[in-house]
Every structure is written in C-alpha cells, then in structure tokens.
Image (spheres, grey):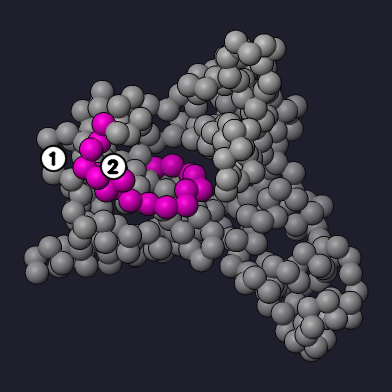
Amino acid sequence: METEQRYRTAYDSIARLCGQGLPGNDLFTRLSGHLRKAVAFRTAGWLRLDPKTAQSLWQATNGQLHRSTRYRTILADLGNGDDVRMVFRSGSSVWGSACLARTATDPPFSRRDISFLARVCEPIARGLRLSHLLAGDQAAGPAPPGVLIVGDDDSVISLSEAARHWLAQLPPDNARGLDLPAAILSAATQARALAAGRPGVGIPEGRVRTSAGGWLRLHAARLTPNDRHGGGQTAVILEPAKPADLSPLILDLHGLTNRERQITQLLLRGLPTADIAQILFISRHTLGDHMKAIFDKLGVSSRPELTALLLDQVLATT
C-alpha cells in the first residue's frame, strides 16, 4: 500500500510539472527528481529518439546482462546493472525517451516499477510537446550542409568544417558513453541496417534541435568501401531544416487528427475544395468544418496563411 501511494504521489507531481511548459532540459532535470522519489535508480539519460519499444535490460536478456553488447561495452564499465527504457509517446508521436540505470549491486527493476514508469510516459510526452509548442520552431541559421563520416564503432573518421560548425551548435546529450548526439548515431545505425537488408528499418534521417532553438535535418547513407578489406563507413549529412521538413513537427505539435492531416496535405497541394471533398468522400460542409478546425489549431485564418506557415516560411508558434 505504501508503495502504491508513493507511485500515485509521484504521478500527480509529474503530471502537474508537465503542464508548466518548461524548456526540455529543465523539464528533464526536475523529472529525474520526481521519478527518483518513486523508483530508485543511479543515473538517468534523457534522449530525443524514436524508439519503438521499451522494457528493462534484465527482462530483455532474461536476467543475463552480459548477453547485451551495450552492457558489455558501456554499462558494465560504468558499474551499472539493470536499466529500463522509457518511451514518451502521445498518440502516434514519440517526443523523446529516457534510460534509468541501477548499479550492478542493486536488484533489477520490479514489474511494479516498470508498470509505474509506463504510466508516466504519456504525461511526460505531453510535457515535451508543450515545451516545443511554447518555444516555437524554426530552421537553423544559414550555413552550408556538413558531412560527417563515422565508423561502425560510431567513431568520427572525418568531418567537414561545416559539420564541425553544426556539431558545435548542438547541445550535449544527457547520457554517458555517447561521443555524438543520439540523433546522429540513430541515423547512422539505421543506414547500416538498411544497407544490410534488415526488415522493418526506417528511413535513415531525422531532425535535431540546436542550442539556439533552430532545427537541423540530418540523413545518413552507407558508403561502399573501395575493396572488400575496407572498413565500414557511414556518411551523415547535417543541414538547416527547410520549412517543409518542419511541417510534420508543427502538425504534431498542434494535435491534428489523421483526417485533418490528410486535408492539410491536399490543401497544400493547391487542390480546390470541391476536389478535396470528392477525393475524401465527404461533403463540402464537412470539409469546411475540418478546415475551420485546422485553421484554429494552427492559428491561421486562410489557406495562404496555412501555406506560409508550413511551406513558405516557419512562423513562431504561440
């Protein structure tokens, strides 16, 4: 009963905290304090990734931590034991993730601990979404694309001066053992998996926010070695995000439904409203209701303003 009360108290505190619109790093720092009151852990690494699943390392390895490459190469040297990954998902959108770790001498996370952590993921996702929404979103300042070459061990082999410039603009990830931002490592990993023909691999690209609040677009590709003895290398390109690159982010931030997303894309293509209604098999009156909802959510009053917001220029969101 005492444990359940501790979980409930922490949940309520986290839900209130996530409604304050705190900047991401401030939110992460304060979240760690609230989570630690309910679930003991040694360290917390907060990452902006797009993971698909979450479970403790102990569960994933059936209690045999040394089966994990990540544990053998990183966590064991840090004195860590079990860890658990949290995915901050709201609806169909993932806003971030965290890794909570215990020491090698601590007991593994219990099923009740993991159940509690799963419950707080949704309010934390809302808090991260609100943080983005209040901050506004825009492309990073003008500069040429940068090229970064990484090895299969994620070490930096070479980089252009532009890449060095963009890396200096990125905040360090709040996680130990990472030499590059997690978004870059994730894109490189996806590119390697795609080249290896693994099923279900996503497109090796993503977005990452600079310390100044702007956005970079990044995409990765596996390089073909000159000969069969060549080492594996992956190129990652970093460049300022175009307004169109940020359109999905803005739609996520403002909570458009799937139908509203469909209509928005058709509006941006310049189709007449009569054609849109026919394509979607809805009446023009129903389409008008959807358009009003879209305009209200995005803070615009007409199709030209919608186009300006999502394609021509990225206005600060309010």
* Tag 2 residue: 61
| Outermost residue to the front | 228
Mark 2: amino acid: Thr
Q: Is residue 84 above or below residue 141?
A: below
Q: Name the one closer to the observer, 70 or 259.
A: 70
Q: Name the one closer to the observer, 172 or 282.
A: 282
* Tag 1 residue: 106
Please state if 228 lies on the left or on the right of 174 as rendered: right
Q: CA distance from mark 1 to mark 2?
A: 17 Å
Mark 1: amino acid: Asp
Q: Secondary structure at mark 2?
A: loop
Q: Is residue 82 above or below residue 125?
A: above
Q: Residue at x 74, y 48 (%)?
A: 243
Q: Which residues are magenta?
A: 46-66
Rendered-image quadrant of the N terminus: bottom left
Q: Residue at x 54, y 59 (%)?
A: 93
